[in-house]
Amino acid sequence: MAQVSALDLGGEKQLLQFFHEPVRLHLLYKVPHRGFKISDLISKFDQEGRFVVIVYLESGTMKGGYMSKRPGFYCQEDRGAFVFEIDHQKANVFPVVKHHNSIIFNREKIGFGGWLNIYSNKDNTLCVDVGFDDTYTPTDWSDEFEVSFMVVELHRIQSVGDVLLNPWRELSWTEKERGSLRKNLVSFKPACQSLNQIRVLLMGPPGSGKSSFINSVRSVMFGRVLLLPFIGTATKGFIKKLKSYDIRSERGGKPTALTLCDVLALGDGETTDLTVRDALAVINGHAPNRHKFQSESPIKAETSGYRPVPSVNDQIHCAVFVLNACQVMTTSDDLTETLRTLQAEISDLDIPQVVLLTHVDQVCHAVQEDVKFVYSSRILQEKMQKPAEVVGLPVSYVLPVKNYSSELSVSCNTDILLLSAVHHILQAVDDTFEDY
Ligand SMILES: Nc1nc2c(ncn2[C@@H]2O[C@H](COP(=O)(O)OP(=O)(O)O)[C@@H](O)[C@H]2O)c(=O)[nH]1
Ligand SMILES: [Mg+2]
């Protein structure tokens, strides 16, 4: 169940005015009175970001503190920290003076110098001490141990500027849109009549989300998140065989025109990775389905099941480069080289290419909250440049998606983003193969 903050509008307004730019609050945790362990609170902090802790005293006053970055066990200095006090008459802020020990963050307590400390006592009850010392700007808060309070909350501070008012791509986030995108896929027939199925090849480094994408598209169609065995967190690619997956309109239903193909992961030129040569053999339709990749024997005429004269239905009709938004900024030179070589070779084959940018939920808080913010997220707008540059394609060919990874049920907006990526892929194939 969603948690609701105890903060009222007036209090929120007073708190937000302490910040020099427009920000929003996002409740991360309402700390329980009983059965409380400090490790529970620590686990609720995001890996990065800015936070406020608010204590609602029984007197009606709120006291709290702000951390301008996530504190760590070994780094508890914070030059941007402040402590505050808000009641119906006034809102006071006390900026940090001695920033070296401005934050306390350890296995016993979380707090702000000697001003505000949160800990649990022996019977796991939540306790709050207030007081003051020379860590923050002098004032006259009195020392009080184990104050009476009603609620303690941890919030994330989010820059409003992260979300642009006008999205840079339009997409409608409604049940109706989800329905019509889904229907489009179910009824899709390739414009080119000699094409029976549209075979889409997913290529990318291990862990980029190739298998998850297949699983996610299937989940969208089945209306529930599928748990398939081929998704791995292993650093080395899981799939060693060329595998084709039909996308059915529903469980046991008719296959749609879309087939997604998973292959060995691309690497930085190591012998265990998919080689450019093998990738091209797959794209051209020479490799049989379930072909087992072997670094020591590249696909050639002698390979069992080799198709010397592949038909248009054996080949790949769209090459999709799958890249992880969290990792794309640090793509190695070798992988970049592999991707660009492939891109250039595939361009010569007149096959459309797109980039699928996965893990978009992990690079922007707003998108993590709701994927409908993808096209209005400033962070993501910037992140889209890099994959385009790495592969050597225009930014308009980059399709952001969030795969189903930890959730147990499908959700409308995640479905819409996935279906819209599929729609663009099918469209690209139709545009290219129209005059085949
Ligand atoms: N948060 C998040 N996790 C993802 C996403 N896509 C994949 N994952 C996770 O990333 C890991 C690697 O995914 P996988 O599909 O096995 O990658 P592959 O090696 O390219 O096939 C798995 O743990 C997935 O659950 C995504 O869009 N968002
Ligand atoms: Mg995989």
Image: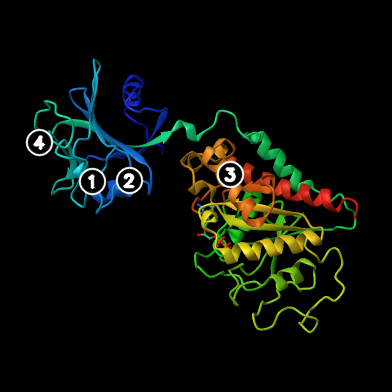
Q: Residues within 10 Å of mark 4 (few under 14, many from 20)?
A: few
Q: Residues within 10 Å of mark 2 (few under 14, many from 20)?
A: some
Q: Is residue 322 rendered to the left or right of residue 158? A: right
SS at mark 4 in the image: loop
Residue at figure coordinates x 41%, y 35% from the top left: 158
Separation of marks 3 and 2 at Cα, in angstroms: 29 Å
* Amino acid type of the residue that numbered disc 3 sits on in the rendered structure: Thr
The mark that comes first in sequence, 4 or 3, is 4
Of pointers 2 and 4, the one earlier in the residue sequence:
2
| Label 1 vs label 4, nearer the camera | 4
**Residue annotated with mark 1:** 36
Query: Is there CB contact under 8 Å for labels 1 and 2?
Result: no
Q: Quadrant of the N terminus?
A: top left
Q: How crowded is mark 3: few (under 14 residues within 10 Å), some or many (20 or more)?
A: many
Whole-percent x, y for residue 327 in the image: 52, 56
Whichever of labels 1 and 3 marks the residue nearer the N terminus, that label is 1
Label 1 amino acid?
Phe
At 65% from the left and 62% from the top, the residue drawn is: 339
| Residue 12, quarter of picture | top left
The image position of residue 131, as x and y in percent, is 12, 33
Whether residue 189 is visible, yes or no, is no
Cα–Cα span, label 1 and label 2: 21 Å
Mark 4 lies on residue = 145
Gap in angstroms between the C-alphas marked 1 and 4: 18 Å
From the image, tell me which residue sits under label 2: 70
Where residue 173 appears, as percent x and y from the top left, is: 62, 35
Q: How is the image coloured?
A: rainbow
Going from N to C along the chain, the mark reached first, 3 or 2, is 2
Judging by the rendered image, the residue that carries numbered circle 3 is 414
Quadrant of ligand 1: it is bottom right
Q: Which amino acid does label 2 sit on?
A: Arg
In the image shown, does 161 or 422 lie closer to the viewer? 161
